[in-house]
Image (cartoon, rainbow, N blue to C red):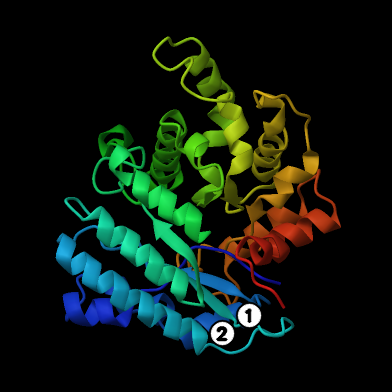
Amino acid sequence: MASQGRDALLALRLVHDLMPIPRNPLALLGQYWDRKEKLEFMKRHQINVSFVSSANPWLDFLPPDRAQTLAQALNNDLDEYCSSSPDADGFPGLKSIYGFGLLPLVPQGSISSVVHTIEQIQSLPHLSGVIMGTKGIGNGLDDEALEPVWKAIEKAGLVVFIHPHYGVDGKAFGDKPNGHVLPLALGFPFETTIAITRLILAGVLDRYPDLLLLLAHSGGALSQLSSRIASCIAHDPVVAKRLKHDARYYLGKLYFDAVAYGPEELGFVSETIGRAETYSSAGGSCNTDLGSARMLFGTDHPFFPPLEGSQKWQSVEDNLSAIRNVRSWNESAQAAVLGLNALKLFNLKY
Protein backbone atom coordinates (compact mmCIF):
# COMPACT_ATOMS: atom_id res chain seq x y z
CA MET A 1 0.00 0.00 0.00
CA ALA A 2 1.33 3.44 -0.89
CA SER A 3 0.19 6.56 0.84
CA GLN A 4 0.10 10.23 0.08
CA GLY A 5 -0.56 12.53 2.96
CA ARG A 6 0.54 15.71 4.65
CA ASP A 7 3.16 13.87 6.65
CA ALA A 8 5.04 16.91 7.89
CA LEU A 9 8.81 16.93 8.27
CA LEU A 10 10.19 19.56 10.63
CA ALA A 11 13.70 19.73 9.23
CA LEU A 12 16.49 19.75 11.80
CA ARG A 13 18.40 22.39 9.89
CA LEU A 14 15.42 24.74 10.31
CA VAL A 15 15.29 24.12 14.04
CA HIS A 16 19.05 24.54 14.41
CA ASP A 17 19.41 27.67 12.28
CA LEU A 18 16.28 29.57 13.24
CA MET A 19 15.05 28.23 16.56
CA PRO A 20 17.91 27.02 18.78
CA ILE A 21 15.32 26.81 21.52
CA PRO A 22 12.13 25.88 19.62
CA ARG A 23 9.29 28.31 20.23
CA ASN A 24 6.87 25.56 19.37
CA PRO A 25 7.06 22.61 21.79
CA LEU A 26 5.80 20.33 19.01
CA ALA A 27 9.22 20.70 17.39
CA LEU A 28 10.63 18.63 20.23
CA LEU A 29 8.37 15.67 19.52
CA GLY A 30 9.97 12.94 17.47
CA GLN A 31 6.83 12.32 15.46
CA TYR A 32 7.49 15.64 13.69
CA TRP A 33 11.00 14.87 12.47
CA ASP A 34 12.33 11.46 13.54
CA ARG A 35 12.46 9.09 10.58
CA LYS A 36 12.53 6.07 12.87
CA GLU A 37 9.20 7.10 14.37
CA LYS A 38 7.84 7.75 10.89
CA LEU A 39 8.83 4.29 9.71
CA GLU A 40 7.35 2.70 12.83
CA PHE A 41 4.10 4.56 12.17
CA MET A 42 4.09 3.31 8.58
CA LYS A 43 4.72 -0.28 9.65
CA ARG A 44 1.97 -0.12 12.26
CA HIS A 45 -0.55 0.98 9.63
CA GLN A 46 0.80 -1.19 6.78
CA ILE A 47 1.92 1.80 4.71
CA ASN A 48 4.69 0.99 2.27
CA VAL A 49 5.43 4.41 0.74
CA SER A 50 4.87 7.87 2.21
CA PHE A 51 5.30 11.40 0.91
CA VAL A 52 6.49 13.93 3.48
CA SER A 53 6.92 17.68 3.57
CA SER A 54 7.99 20.51 5.82
CA ALA A 55 5.13 21.78 7.96
CA ASN A 56 3.26 25.02 7.45
CA PRO A 57 3.97 27.94 7.59
CA TRP A 58 7.01 26.69 5.63
CA LEU A 59 9.29 29.69 4.96
CA ASP A 60 6.60 32.37 5.01
CA PHE A 61 8.11 34.23 7.98
CA LEU A 62 11.59 34.68 6.48
CA PRO A 63 13.14 37.56 4.51
CA PRO A 64 13.59 36.74 0.80
CA ASP A 65 17.36 36.11 0.81
CA ARG A 66 17.15 33.78 3.81
CA ALA A 67 14.13 31.97 2.35
CA GLN A 68 15.98 31.26 -0.90
CA THR A 69 19.11 29.96 0.81
CA LEU A 70 17.20 27.84 3.30
CA ALA A 71 14.77 26.45 0.72
CA GLN A 72 17.60 25.00 -1.32
CA ALA A 73 19.38 23.66 1.76
CA LEU A 74 16.21 22.06 3.10
CA ASN A 75 15.43 20.54 -0.29
CA ASN A 76 18.86 18.91 -0.35
CA ASP A 77 18.36 17.72 3.23
CA LEU A 78 14.97 16.25 2.40
CA ASP A 79 16.29 14.46 -0.67
CA GLU A 80 18.98 12.86 1.49
CA TYR A 81 16.38 12.01 4.16
CA CYS A 82 14.34 10.21 1.49
CA SER A 83 17.16 8.61 -0.46
CA SER A 84 18.61 7.03 2.68
CA SER A 85 15.25 5.65 3.79
CA PRO A 86 14.75 1.86 3.57
CA ASP A 87 13.57 0.24 0.37
CA ALA A 88 9.80 0.03 0.12
CA ASP A 89 8.44 -3.38 1.06
CA GLY A 90 6.70 -4.93 -1.93
CA PHE A 91 7.75 -2.19 -4.38
CA PRO A 92 11.13 -3.16 -5.90
CA GLY A 93 13.29 -0.18 -6.77
CA LEU A 94 11.32 2.29 -4.67
CA LYS A 95 12.22 3.95 -1.39
CA SER A 96 9.83 4.04 1.54
CA ILE A 97 9.81 7.85 1.73
CA TYR A 98 9.60 10.58 -0.92
CA GLY A 99 9.15 14.30 -0.43
CA PHE A 100 7.68 17.62 -1.47
CA GLY A 101 10.24 20.39 -1.84
CA LEU A 102 9.99 23.98 -0.63
CA LEU A 103 9.88 27.15 -2.71
CA PRO A 104 11.00 30.59 -1.43
CA LEU A 105 7.53 32.07 -1.87
CA VAL A 106 7.66 35.06 0.46
CA PRO A 107 6.63 38.73 0.14
CA GLN A 108 9.11 40.76 -1.92
CA GLY A 109 10.70 37.50 -3.00
CA SER A 110 12.39 37.14 -6.37
CA ILE A 111 10.41 35.17 -8.93
CA SER A 112 13.66 34.18 -10.62
CA SER A 113 14.84 32.60 -7.35
CA VAL A 114 11.59 30.63 -7.16
CA VAL A 115 12.05 29.38 -10.73
CA HIS A 116 15.66 28.46 -9.94
CA THR A 117 14.48 26.45 -6.93
CA ILE A 118 11.93 24.65 -9.10
CA GLU A 119 14.82 23.58 -11.33
CA GLN A 120 16.72 22.38 -8.26
CA ILE A 121 13.78 20.30 -7.07
CA GLN A 122 13.38 18.77 -10.51
CA SER A 123 16.98 17.58 -10.31
CA LEU A 124 16.53 15.86 -6.94
CA PRO A 125 15.41 12.27 -7.60
CA HIS A 126 13.48 11.70 -4.38
CA LEU A 127 11.45 14.92 -4.42
CA SER A 128 8.27 14.37 -6.38
CA GLY A 129 6.76 17.82 -6.15
CA VAL A 130 6.46 21.00 -4.11
CA ILE A 131 4.29 21.99 -1.19
CA MET A 132 2.74 25.44 -1.38
CA GLY A 133 0.51 27.61 0.76
CA THR A 134 -2.18 29.91 -0.57
CA LYS A 135 -0.45 33.30 -0.32
CA GLY A 136 2.12 33.05 -3.09
CA ILE A 137 4.45 36.02 -2.66
CA GLY A 138 1.81 37.86 -0.67
CA ASN A 139 -1.06 38.42 -3.08
CA GLY A 140 -2.53 34.94 -3.49
CA LEU A 141 -2.11 32.23 -6.09
CA ASP A 142 -3.92 34.29 -8.74
CA ASP A 143 -1.16 36.92 -8.66
CA GLU A 144 0.02 37.71 -12.20
CA ALA A 145 3.58 37.79 -10.87
CA LEU A 146 3.38 33.99 -10.44
CA GLU A 147 2.94 33.30 -14.16
CA PRO A 148 6.61 32.27 -14.62
CA VAL A 149 6.26 29.99 -11.59
CA TRP A 150 3.24 28.13 -12.99
CA LYS A 151 4.96 27.89 -16.36
CA ALA A 152 8.13 26.44 -14.81
CA ILE A 153 6.22 23.97 -12.63
CA GLU A 154 4.15 22.76 -15.56
CA LYS A 155 7.27 22.34 -17.69
CA ALA A 156 9.02 20.43 -14.88
CA GLY A 157 6.03 18.11 -14.42
CA LEU A 158 6.11 18.57 -10.64
CA VAL A 159 3.06 17.94 -8.47
CA VAL A 160 2.00 20.98 -6.43
CA PHE A 161 0.49 20.06 -3.07
CA ILE A 162 -1.59 23.08 -2.04
CA HIS A 163 -2.16 23.24 1.70
CA PRO A 164 -3.76 25.96 3.87
CA HIS A 165 -2.28 27.63 6.92
CA TYR A 166 -3.90 31.00 7.60
CA GLY A 167 -7.56 30.03 7.56
CA VAL A 168 -10.22 32.73 7.45
CA ASP A 169 -11.01 35.67 9.71
CA GLY A 170 -10.89 34.20 13.21
CA LYS A 171 -13.48 36.68 14.46
CA ALA A 172 -16.13 34.52 12.81
CA PHE A 173 -15.32 31.74 15.29
CA GLY A 174 -16.40 33.72 18.34
CA ASP A 175 -14.93 33.67 21.83
CA LYS A 176 -16.10 30.28 23.11
CA PRO A 177 -13.29 27.86 24.03
CA ASN A 178 -13.64 25.36 21.19
CA GLY A 179 -10.00 24.36 20.89
CA HIS A 180 -8.77 24.04 17.33
CA VAL A 181 -12.01 22.63 15.93
CA LEU A 182 -13.27 25.68 14.05
CA PRO A 183 -9.93 26.80 12.54
CA LEU A 184 -8.99 23.27 11.44
CA ALA A 185 -12.39 21.90 10.42
CA LEU A 186 -13.66 25.10 8.77
CA GLY A 187 -10.90 27.70 8.47
CA PHE A 188 -8.42 25.50 6.61
CA PRO A 189 -10.90 24.05 4.07
CA PHE A 190 -12.45 27.47 3.39
CA GLU A 191 -8.99 28.94 2.81
CA THR A 192 -8.33 26.27 0.19
CA THR A 193 -11.75 26.76 -1.41
CA ILE A 194 -11.19 30.49 -1.82
CA ALA A 195 -7.63 30.10 -3.10
CA ILE A 196 -8.52 27.56 -5.79
CA THR A 197 -11.62 29.48 -6.88
CA ARG A 198 -9.44 32.54 -7.35
CA LEU A 199 -6.98 30.42 -9.33
CA ILE A 200 -9.77 29.21 -11.61
CA LEU A 201 -11.21 32.71 -12.03
CA ALA A 202 -7.78 34.04 -13.00
CA GLY A 203 -7.65 31.54 -15.88
CA VAL A 204 -4.50 29.84 -14.60
CA LEU A 205 -5.87 26.39 -15.44
CA ASP A 206 -6.73 27.58 -18.95
CA ARG A 207 -3.22 28.87 -19.57
CA TYR A 208 -1.48 25.90 -17.91
CA PRO A 209 -3.79 22.92 -18.51
CA ASP A 210 -1.11 20.38 -17.60
CA LEU A 211 -0.49 21.68 -14.09
CA LEU A 212 -0.66 18.90 -11.51
CA LEU A 213 -2.40 20.45 -8.51
CA LEU A 214 -3.16 18.29 -5.48
CA LEU A 215 -5.53 19.84 -2.94
CA ALA A 216 -5.47 19.14 0.78
CA HIS A 217 -8.56 18.09 2.73
CA SER A 218 -10.36 16.89 -0.40
CA GLY A 219 -10.39 20.41 -1.78
CA GLY A 220 -12.26 21.95 1.12
CA ALA A 221 -15.76 22.95 0.06
CA LEU A 222 -14.87 23.34 -3.62
CA SER A 223 -16.93 20.35 -4.79
CA GLN A 224 -19.93 21.24 -2.65
CA LEU A 225 -19.97 24.84 -3.91
CA SER A 226 -18.87 24.23 -7.49
CA SER A 227 -22.32 24.63 -9.05
CA ARG A 228 -23.00 27.77 -7.03
CA ILE A 229 -19.64 29.16 -8.16
CA ALA A 230 -20.50 28.33 -11.79
CA SER A 231 -23.89 30.02 -11.49
CA CYS A 232 -22.40 33.16 -9.98
CA ILE A 233 -19.85 33.34 -12.81
CA ALA A 234 -22.55 32.89 -15.45
CA HIS A 235 -24.60 35.75 -14.01
CA ASP A 236 -21.76 38.22 -13.48
CA PRO A 237 -20.80 40.37 -16.49
CA VAL A 238 -17.33 40.95 -15.04
CA VAL A 239 -16.34 37.29 -15.37
CA ALA A 240 -19.06 35.59 -17.46
CA LYS A 241 -16.93 35.42 -20.63
CA ARG A 242 -13.53 35.07 -19.00
CA LEU A 243 -13.03 31.30 -18.82
CA LYS A 244 -12.84 28.70 -21.60
CA HIS A 245 -15.14 26.32 -19.74
CA ASP A 246 -17.81 26.17 -17.08
CA ALA A 247 -16.14 26.36 -13.66
CA ARG A 248 -17.21 22.78 -12.85
CA TYR A 249 -15.02 21.49 -15.66
CA TYR A 250 -11.84 22.41 -13.82
CA LEU A 251 -12.51 20.02 -10.93
CA GLY A 252 -11.67 17.24 -13.35
CA LYS A 253 -8.23 18.77 -13.84
CA LEU A 254 -7.37 18.74 -10.14
CA TYR A 255 -6.26 16.02 -7.73
CA PHE A 256 -7.64 15.68 -4.21
CA ASP A 257 -6.35 13.97 -1.12
CA ALA A 258 -8.89 11.66 0.48
CA VAL A 259 -8.62 13.20 3.93
CA ALA A 260 -12.34 13.82 4.46
CA TYR A 261 -12.99 11.15 7.10
CA GLY A 262 -16.34 10.00 5.69
CA PRO A 263 -17.41 7.84 2.72
CA GLU A 264 -20.31 10.10 1.75
CA GLU A 265 -18.01 13.12 1.56
CA LEU A 266 -15.47 11.25 -0.54
CA GLY A 267 -18.22 9.91 -2.78
CA PHE A 268 -19.57 13.41 -3.41
CA VAL A 269 -16.13 14.76 -4.35
CA SER A 270 -15.64 11.77 -6.64
CA GLU A 271 -18.96 12.41 -8.39
CA THR A 272 -18.19 16.08 -9.03
CA ILE A 273 -14.86 15.09 -10.56
CA GLY A 274 -16.54 12.41 -12.67
CA ARG A 275 -19.06 14.82 -14.16
CA ALA A 276 -16.45 17.46 -15.02
CA GLU A 277 -16.17 16.67 -18.73
CA THR A 278 -19.88 17.34 -19.21
CA TYR A 279 -19.06 21.00 -18.54
CA SER A 280 -16.35 21.25 -21.18
CA SER A 281 -17.04 23.87 -23.84
CA ALA A 282 -16.46 21.11 -26.39
CA GLY A 283 -18.94 18.82 -24.72
CA GLY A 284 -18.27 15.52 -23.03
CA SER A 285 -19.75 12.70 -21.03
CA CYS A 286 -19.72 11.70 -17.38
CA ASN A 287 -16.88 9.36 -16.38
CA THR A 288 -17.53 7.76 -13.02
CA ASP A 289 -14.04 6.23 -12.98
CA LEU A 290 -12.38 9.64 -13.21
CA GLY A 291 -13.35 10.57 -9.66
CA SER A 292 -11.55 7.74 -7.93
CA ALA A 293 -8.59 8.15 -10.32
CA ARG A 294 -7.90 11.65 -9.00
CA MET A 295 -8.11 11.00 -5.26
CA LEU A 296 -5.24 9.87 -3.02
CA PHE A 297 -5.17 8.34 0.44
CA GLY A 298 -3.68 10.56 3.14
CA THR A 299 -3.01 10.17 6.84
CA ASP A 300 -2.68 13.67 8.36
CA HIS A 301 0.29 12.22 10.27
CA PRO A 302 2.02 13.48 12.41
CA PHE A 303 -0.98 15.57 13.42
CA PHE A 304 -4.04 14.25 15.28
CA PRO A 305 -2.22 11.69 17.44
CA PRO A 306 -4.36 9.37 19.60
CA LEU A 307 -5.53 11.13 22.74
CA GLU A 308 -5.15 7.99 24.82
CA GLY A 309 -1.96 6.54 23.37
CA SER A 310 -3.63 3.93 21.19
CA GLN A 311 -1.24 2.06 18.93
CA LYS A 312 -3.21 2.93 15.81
CA TRP A 313 -4.17 6.48 14.89
CA GLN A 314 -7.91 7.07 14.58
CA SER A 315 -7.31 9.62 11.80
CA VAL A 316 -5.70 6.92 9.67
CA GLU A 317 -8.28 4.27 10.50
CA ASP A 318 -11.16 6.67 9.77
CA ASN A 319 -9.72 7.59 6.37
CA LEU A 320 -9.14 3.95 5.48
CA SER A 321 -12.69 3.07 6.51
CA ALA A 322 -14.08 5.98 4.50
CA ILE A 323 -12.28 4.85 1.34
CA ARG A 324 -13.46 1.26 1.75
CA ASN A 325 -17.08 2.32 2.21
CA VAL A 326 -17.65 4.70 -0.69
CA ARG A 327 -20.61 3.03 -2.37
CA SER A 328 -19.57 3.86 -5.93
CA TRP A 329 -16.01 2.54 -5.53
CA ASN A 330 -15.31 -1.10 -6.29
CA GLU A 331 -12.17 -2.90 -5.13
CA SER A 332 -10.21 -1.61 -8.11
CA ALA A 333 -11.15 1.99 -7.34
CA GLN A 334 -10.25 1.53 -3.68
CA ALA A 335 -6.84 0.12 -4.59
CA ALA A 336 -6.24 3.09 -6.85
CA VAL A 337 -7.05 5.61 -4.11
CA LEU A 338 -5.05 3.68 -1.53
CA GLY A 339 -1.84 3.82 -3.54
CA LEU A 340 -1.87 3.19 -7.26
CA ASN A 341 -2.98 6.74 -8.06
CA ALA A 342 -0.04 8.12 -6.08
CA LEU A 343 2.45 5.91 -7.89
CA LYS A 344 1.06 7.09 -11.23
CA LEU A 345 0.80 10.77 -10.32
CA PHE A 346 4.35 10.91 -8.95
CA ASN A 347 5.67 8.72 -11.78
CA LEU A 348 7.13 6.09 -9.45
CA LYS A 349 7.78 2.89 -11.34
CA TYR A 350 8.63 -0.49 -9.84
Could one spot residue 164 in this view of the protein? no
Q: Quadrant for the C terminus, please.
A: bottom right
Q: For the residue marked with disc 1, what is the amino acid?
A: Arg
Q: Which of the 4 quarters of the picture holds residue 331? A: bottom right
Disc 2 to disc 1, C-alpha distance: 6 Å
Q: Which of the 4 quarters of the picture holds residue 67? A: bottom left
SS at badge 1: helix
Query: At 49% across and 82% down in the image, what residue appears?
Result: 82
Q: Is residue 218 left or right of residue 69?
A: right
Residue 40: numbered disc: 2
Q: For the residue marked with disc 2, what is the amino acid?
A: Glu
Residue 280 image position (x, y, % from top left): 66, 27
Q: Quadrant for the N terminus, please.
A: bottom right
Query: At 25% across and 73% down in the image, what residue appears?
Result: 70
Residue 138 image position (x, y, % from top left): 23, 45
Graded by Cα atoms within 10 Å as few (under 14), some (14 to 19) or many (20 or more), the crowding at tag 1 reads few
Could one spot residue 63 in this view of the protein? yes
Residue 221: numbered disc: none
- Dot 1 corresponds to which residue? 44
